[in-house]
Image: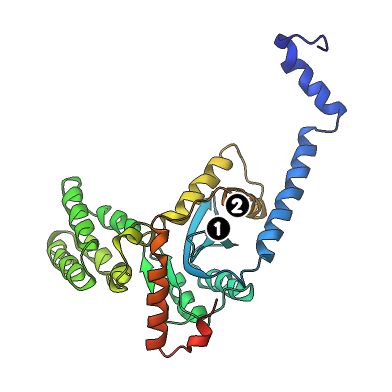
Amino acid sequence: MNGVSTRKYKEIIPEMADTVGVSKSQISREFVAASEAEFKRLCERRFDDANILVIYIDGIQFGDCHVIAALGVDSDGQKHVLGIREGSSENSRVTTDLLNDLVERGIKADRLRLFVIDGSKALRCAIDSVFGHKNPVQRCRIHKVRNVLSYLAKDQQQPVQASMKAAFSLDAKKGQQKLQKLVEWLDREYPSAAASLREGLTEMFTINRLGLPLELHRCLGSTNVIESPNSGIRRWTCRVKRWRDHSMVVRWVAASLLEMENKFRRIMGYQHLWILETKLNELAEKSGIAKDEQVA
């Protein structure tokens, strides 16, 4: 229509771009401004009216920059990006700051919630410090299986993995007994694998101990719910060849998470979340937390 051959469009587009102010540097400035706005929006979001039952926390790494993210699930099974912080989940100050920020923005500490985390000791301590030690914590089973298998000979990995998965499907008492026997067996030839399995063993069965239906175990037994968005972030940022600084990483993570949030689906088994809410309320009553403090 404008006398430009389709064979020559690659040559003419750069010239056109310069005439309308869409140079590479201009696009870069526009994206910096847009991503800063998204990060600000994420940091200022409030959750006073959200009935958050579950909080997942996990980390993602870009080069030498670590970012931890918190994702919440409400009573309808909807996922909410709660917040992010630059730093490692092994850093107690970073994890505590992240959780304190959630409290300030409406995720109050006056009720019980289920936390799903990896094996970070700093994060576990931060939960106790900010939200109280009575909140149930579920350790990610997938992380645990990977850690244990990493210490084993290849021919031992499949049977150990099968034993662990079988134990997770049992009630808490029987499941822990089964894994304790596995620990004793591993101690003979694979002491590092045994130590890994022994660490945090009780919290591997938190959802079993709460008596939650199997339909919820897949989503509540691991941090996959938040690892999936983390994979999405890597797809969004795969073309970035060089991270200029850590603030760039944080801005990209914030913008990516908020964009993906629009496409989040409800968690599997969300129809049974009322059972989790009931169990949390019962646990709160037994723990001496006032019932009127359970209102979201």
> Which amino acid, by three-letter code, is at mark 2?
Val
**Going by the image, does 113 lie left or right of 2?**
left
- Viewer-side residue, 279 vs 204: 279
Q: Where is residue 278, by image quadrant?
A: bottom left
- Viewer-side residue, 214 vs 20: 214
Q: Are marks 1 and 2 in contact (CB under 8 Å)?
A: yes
Residue 191 sits above or below residue 285 on the image: above
What residue is shown at x 73% (from left), y 44% (from top)? 31
Task: Residue 192: give x, y in percent of width and height.
Answer: 24, 62
Q: Secondary structure at mark 1?
A: strand
Q: Residue furthest right?
A: 19
Figure disc tally: 2
Task: Residue 42: give x, y in percent of width and height.
Answer: 66, 60
Task: Residue 109: give x, y in percent of width and height.
Answer: 53, 80
Whether residue 206 appears in this view of the structure is yes
The quarter of the image holding the N terminus is top right
Whether residue 237 appears in this view of the structure is no
Residue 173 sits above or below residue 65 on the image: below
**Going by the image, does 165 lie left or right of 210?**
left
Q: Secondary structure at mark 2?
A: helix
> Which amino acid, by three-letter code, is at mark 1?
Val
Real-space Cα distance between discs 1 and 2?
8 Å
Label 1 or label 2, whichever comes before in sequence order: 1
The residue where tag 1 is placed is 67
Q: Which mark is residue 223?
A: none
Q: Which mark is residue 253?
A: 2
What residue is shown at x 74% (from left), y 11% (from top)? 8
Q: In the image, which is nearer the foreground, mark 1 or mark 2?
A: 2
In this figure, which colouring scheme has been used for the structure? Answer: rainbow
